[in-house]
Image: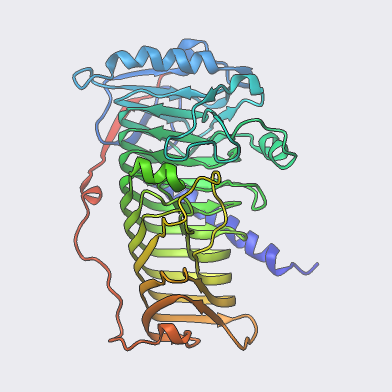
Amino acid sequence: MALSPLHLIRSACVLLLVAASTVAARRNGPPASGGGQSVYLAPSCREHTASLTDFGGVGDGTTSNTKAFMSAVEHLSQYSGESGGGGMLYVPAGKWLTGPFNLTSHFTLYLHSDAVILGSTDMSEWHIIDPLPSYGRGRDKIGGRYASLIGGSNLTDVVITGANGTIDGQGAMWWSKFHKNQLKYTRGYLIEVMHSDTVVISNVTLVNSPAWNIHPVYSRNIVVQGVTILAPTHSPNTDGINPDSCSHVRIEDCYIVSGDDCVAIKSGWDEYGIAYGMPSEHIVVRRLTCVSPTSAVIALGSEMSGGISDVRAEDITAVNTESAVRIKTAVGRGAYVRDVFVRGMSLETMKWVFRMTGNYKSHPDDKYDPNAVPVVENISYQDIVATGVTIAARLEGIQGAPFRGICIANVTATLAKSRKYPWTCTDVEGVSAGVTPAPCQPLQGAHDGACPFPTDTLPIDQLVLQQCAYSVPSS
């Protein structure tokens, strides 16, 4: 039986995923096992370890372990002071059903290769928390929101890692209720840390999140590396990694299949984000592989009212994805998206390579300021090869406030079929060189052939993770 092109693409992605998992396993040594040695990367190693089973955990996939997780974290929090040596919670092989629980400082959550943390489908376990102040309301609904499965606030030095163990949000129930408008509150995320400093998430697999997968917010010094994120491509708002009003972020060596943007950089929503005034800045994305037929590899916005600046992305691969880079904003957002640098992208089967929207009609309420006009400037794309492209670009700025300083160089987009107008541009200004098909007239300014890309080293690249080893507790 002949296979469809989409089936072939999915098969290729599975092979890529298997290869990525194998590489991750080799990089981190043999899987953890009873009585053996395990290693992990962390800003600092932990002196105290405990197993979830020490607190009554049962890994049968049906017994609730919410109290066990809470008790374990509470016990290990006694070591969370800077002189306490830190604590690590070891999650053994098994299926550990749980409702939301919070982490503590100087703490590592470590998952065995065959450990699965399962999000409970008992909605009574998901308590309601306040909306984010920079959003003014829940993202899905007015009012509060369900807690995230793994959370924490005001943390320092926290690590979520393992031998590629799994965190499964069991999101199908949430997606169904969302589509049927049966939820009173905004869905929780798989991992959310707030007001925190030095957070590392590595070498885990995240699947079927109710909504966004990884959401650091109002935080700094964030590293996400070697993470696999999987969700059905039709699942609603299952964004991969969403730094939100965060600074000094490093995302690298991640593989994401998503029903929404693979990486979305945000900073608050309309008047609430303007009032909170906390930007996202100094963000690096490297060696990212993305599959998302309805959304972007990297999105900036649409909630960007605290500002977004100094974003650097390179060595990006995407297959069957709507757009490579998308800037989303609107009148009422205010603030800015500036100094965005992208180079080295390999793209296959794309609707658009470049997408900019200055009229993104999503507002928390009707109280936004119509005079809060966002500034979009200094956006650079270079060294990009794309095949199977429907439209090279759709760039729509804001009338009276065009998007300026756009630079595009050394880009080849091979269209799936010939089009009379492969580029659509309104209210944008910039330059280009070596671009095929030829860009629209507003981007044909004279150029010397190279777009800027910063050469300085950001502080987040100087954050060193050391290899830590410990004896796995015997089962």
Instruction: Name the image quarter holding residue 379.
Output: bottom left
The reply, left or right, for residue 455 in relation to residue 261 is left
The reply, left or right, for residue 73 in relation to residue 96 is left
The reply, left or right, for residue 109 in relation to residue 181 is left
Total residue callouts? 0
Task: Return the x and y of residue 267 as percentages of the image width and height.
Answer: 40, 47
Q: Is residue 475 visible?
A: no
Considering only vertical position in the picture, is 34 above or below 346? above
Instruction: Name the image quarter holding residue 202.
Output: top left
Instruction: Name the image quarter holding residue 175.
Output: top right
Q: Residue at x 30, y 76 (%)?
A: 451
Q: Is residue 207 visible?
A: yes
Considering only vertical position in the picture, is 241 above or below 471? below
The one nearer the camera, 177 or 104, is 177
Q: Residue at x 46, y 52 (%)?
A: 264
The one nearer the camera, 158 or 322, is 322
State the residue lying farthest toward the right: 1
The reply, left or right, for residue 93 in relation to residue 254 is right
Look at the image and name its color scheme.
rainbow
Task: Return the x and y of residue 314 as percentages of the image width and height.
Answer: 36, 64
The one nearer the camera, 8 or 43, is 43
Task: Return the x and y of residue 17 as percentages of the image width and height.
Answer: 54, 53
Q: Residue at x 52, y 46 (%)?
A: 229
> Quick one: quadrant of the N terminus?
bottom right
Task: Return the x and y of residue 453 as percentages of the image width and height.
Answer: 27, 69
